[in-house]
Image (cartoon, helix red, strand yellow):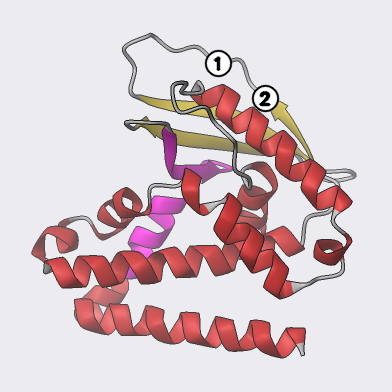
């Protein structure tokens, strides 16, 4: 699957933050729907984003996406056994760089949003459930619909996303394959450095676009 389409679909559905009361935890399907509705309104009304203001897009991504994703769990899942073999310092560095990679990718996807709408599938869960999947579908004007499934885990104060499936393709599985191949050719420090270099290159590209 084309990576831009993959992440554009993610960004179009789940890019926002909510002002949640401390004593109240939103149900996972309500969280997804409320945040998606909110972000679509922001995108449609923000002329700077529509004009491609990369600095503002990255800022919005940091503010509105990051709080809803569990990057540490995602890092554990994409690395598998390599996570357990890594030192605490390596785990911390990898998680930070993986997070930065996703933030930049989401920002690019957010800039490409064009009038998609969202259909929410029926959702049921038991009171004791702490790991669920919320199913949605992106409706693209004049294009094929894209099914999107969100895997969320219940935390102390809110539900957080730890994986997303687009057209049946898992974000975690997608990166696990990439990183596994790179680890076979090198080691954890080499993988981390590749992410550092890629994030630096993406940052320089964003600055160049802004100028």
**Image coords of residue 157 (percent x, y):** 38, 31
Say if mark 1 contacts mark 2, CB within 8 Å. Answer: yes
Mark 1: which secondary structure?
Answer: loop
Judge whether 39 appears above or below 188 on screen: above
> What residue is drawn where x is 61% and y is 55%?
6
Q: In this view, does 189 lie to the left or right of 70?
A: left
| Mark 2 neighbour class, 10 Å CA radius: few under 14, some 14 to 19, many 20 or more | some
Disc 1 target residue:
123
> What residue is drawn where x is 24% and y is 74%?
183
Q: Quadrant of residue 174?
A: bottom left
Observer-nearest of 90 and 20: 20
- Is residue 16 a member of the stretch shown in magenta? no
> What residue is drawn where x is 49% and y is 44%?
68
Q: In this view, does 77 lie to the left or right of 84?
A: right
Observer-nearest of 190 and 207: 207
Q: In which quarter of the image is the N terminus?
A: bottom right
Give the residue at the far top of this rendering: 126
What span is in magenta? Answer: 159-179
**Image coords of residue 133 (percent x, y):** 46, 28
Q: Quadrant of the C terminus?
A: bottom right
Disc 2 target residue:
120
Judge whether 5 appears above or below 123 on screen: below
């Amino acid at each position: 699957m084309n990576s831009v389409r993959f992440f554009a679909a993610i960004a179009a559905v789940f890019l926002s933050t909510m002002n949640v009361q401390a004593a109240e935890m939103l149900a996972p399907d309500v969280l997804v729907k409320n945040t998606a509705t909110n972000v679509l309104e922001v995108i449609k009304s923000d002329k700077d984003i529509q004009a491609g203001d990369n600095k503002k897009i990255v800022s919005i991504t940091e503010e509105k996406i990051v709080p809803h994703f569990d990057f540490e769990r995602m890092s554990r899942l994409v690395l598998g056994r390599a996570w357990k073999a890594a030192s605490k310092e390596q785990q911390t560095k990898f998680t930070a760089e993986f997070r930065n990679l996703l933030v930049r990718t989401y920002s690019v996807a957010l800039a490409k949003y064009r009038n998609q709408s969202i259909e929410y599938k029926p959702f049921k869960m038991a009171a004791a459930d702490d790991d669920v999947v919320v199913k949605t579908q992106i409706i693209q004007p004049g294009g094929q619909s894209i099914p999107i499934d969100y895997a969320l885990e219940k935390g102390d104060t809110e539900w957080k996303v730890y994986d997303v499936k687009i057209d049946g393709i898992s974000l975690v599985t997608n990166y696990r394959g990439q990183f596994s191949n790179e680890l076979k050719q090198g080691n954890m420090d080499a993988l981390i450095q590749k992410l550092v270099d890629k994030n630096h290159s993406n940052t320089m590209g964003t600055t160049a676009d802004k100028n």
